[in-house]
Image: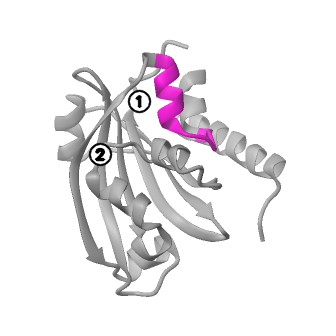
Amino acid sequence: MTMSKNEANKRLIERINDLEKENNKQFSNTQKILLTTDGSITAILDVLYGKIDLDTLDQHFENADEYHAGLVDVEVDTEINFREVIMHKGSKPLIYAISHIPLSRCSKDVCADLVRADIPIGRILKNYNIESRREIREIYLEKPNEKLKELFQEDCEMLAREYVIINNNQVLMWIKEVFPITYFTEI
């Protein structure tokens, strides 16, 4: 059953409040916006920093195992695009993201842009006028793994969110975005 937009927003606000209480933290307004937006993070970062860039760290195709098939609501062994990127402004990393995309749900042009890499998903959706909506599945704090410590040069906790992009009532993409809790604290 799909929640109304008001119910979804209320649930996200409650989740942020719970996360702050559980961890004795106070998130900035910018952090809250980045964690709860149902719009493009790329667009928000472009407003905050000017046009941001994206570097692809890894991209490959794989057949979905049970876990990954569940994330994108496909059968096991369905081919998915695994993509790992870092959004940055100059040499400053901003957001680390992982996405899983069932290739069968993308047009050839969208798949070509994904494979060509270094184009944020938000821009791809906008470029092709893909009507979609985002459903945030989870917002949480996590300890950084070695890759995140190296990318951000930080050893602090990371704020993370997982969401799906829905198109034609099907999961088009599953995305996880991560940034250090010390980022975006000014506002």
Image quadrant in which you'd find residue 149: top left
Residue type beneath disc 2: Val
Relative placement, left or right, of 143 versus 9 is left
The image quarter containing residue 156 is top left
Mark sitting earlier along the chain (1/2): 2
Tell which residue pokes out farthest to the front in this image: 109
- Name which residue lies at 63% across and 55% down: 132
Give the residue type at disc 1. Answer: Ile
Point out the frontmost of discs 1 and 2: 2
Q: Is residue 184 left or right of residue 85?
A: right
Quickly name the residue at label 2: 85
Label 1 CA crowd tier, 10 Å (few <14, some 14–19, many 20+): some
Quarter of the picture holding the C terminus: top right
Residue 93 picture location, percent across and down: 28, 29
Magenta region includes residue 65: no
Q: Which residues are magenta?
A: 36-48
Q: Residue at x 31, y 63 (%)?
A: 82
Q: Secondary structure at mark 2?
A: strand
According to the image, label 1 marks what residue?
181
Whole-percent x, y for residue 74 in the image: 48, 81
- Front in this rendered view, residue 135 or 132: 132
